Image (spheres, helix red, strand yellow):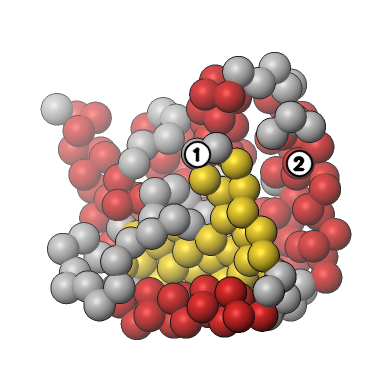
Amino acid sequence: MRAGLKQQSERVKPLYERTRLIRAYEPQTVPGFLQTPGYTRAVIEDVSRFHDLTDDIDQAVEGRLNRLRILESGMCGFSFVIEAGALYAQRGSVAVMLEQFDYIDHAARFANVALGIIPLGRLRTIWPGEGFYVYDESLVRSEHWTGGYRTKRPSEIATYLRIFMLLQSQAVYGEAARAEVAAARRLLQSREIA
């Protein structure tokens, strides 16, 4: 974090560009590769406030949007597993969230994207944990409250891949995943009207 949010985004760009398959699990937020500019801005503002960072928010948002460009380029495959609760955690305005839901629905139709959502109240065989990203079979990254975790150790990567497979088995895909997004949208809109 000391290097700043924009610097952090620029530093990982080569990793994104050389990876062929990114597996991402997020329990509390929309994965970065699926974030719209407004949602990204809301997240960066929260992180900046929490860590007392003085980065230029606009530059940090632009740096993080490289992930969106990589997703849309089709040069890399993505497998996402999101806890449904992440869809209900409002980041930014209602308009920002509605745009985010639209984009998730749009991106879920890309040929290079598999989107799984673990529904609320699902009988679990694996508990929710910290979010993490697995890049091919060579690196795992995870962000925590106080910093980031990275490992290239094959045994640890194998553990994360096993966890990811268990989480995938809990998720719904296709129309069922889009129905989860639609349910979160309806709740958000009903709260706005009330």
CA gap between label 1 and label 2 equals 16 Å
**Identity, as a three-letter code, of the amino acid under mark 2:** Gln
- Can I make out residue 184 in this image? yes
The answer to whether residue 183 is above or below residue 107 is above
Local secondary structure at mark 1: loop
Classify 10 Å Cα crowding around label 2: few (below 14), some (14-19), many (20 and above): some
Which residue, given by chain and number where applicable, does mark 2 sit on?
A: 8
Classify 10 Å Cα crowding around label 1: few (below 14), some (14-19), many (20 and above): few
Q: Earlier in the sequence, mark 1 or mark 2?
A: 2
Q: Is residue 171 left or right of residue 149?
A: left
Image position, residue 79 (x, y; %)? 54, 74
Which residue, given by chain and number where applicable, does mark 1 sit on?
A: 145
Image position, residue 21 (x, y; %)? 67, 77
Q: Quadrant of residue 116?
A: bottom left
Q: Is residue 19 left or right of residue 179?
A: right
The answer to whether residue 161 is above or below residue 122 is below
Q: Which residue corresponds to the image point at 24% horizontal and 55% vertical from the top-left?
A: 183
**Identity, as a three-letter code, of the amino acid under mark 1:** Trp
Q: Is residue 54 left or right of residue 129?
A: right
Local secondary structure at mark 2: helix
Q: Quadrant of residue 151?
A: bottom right
Image position, residue 52 (x, y; %)? 60, 18
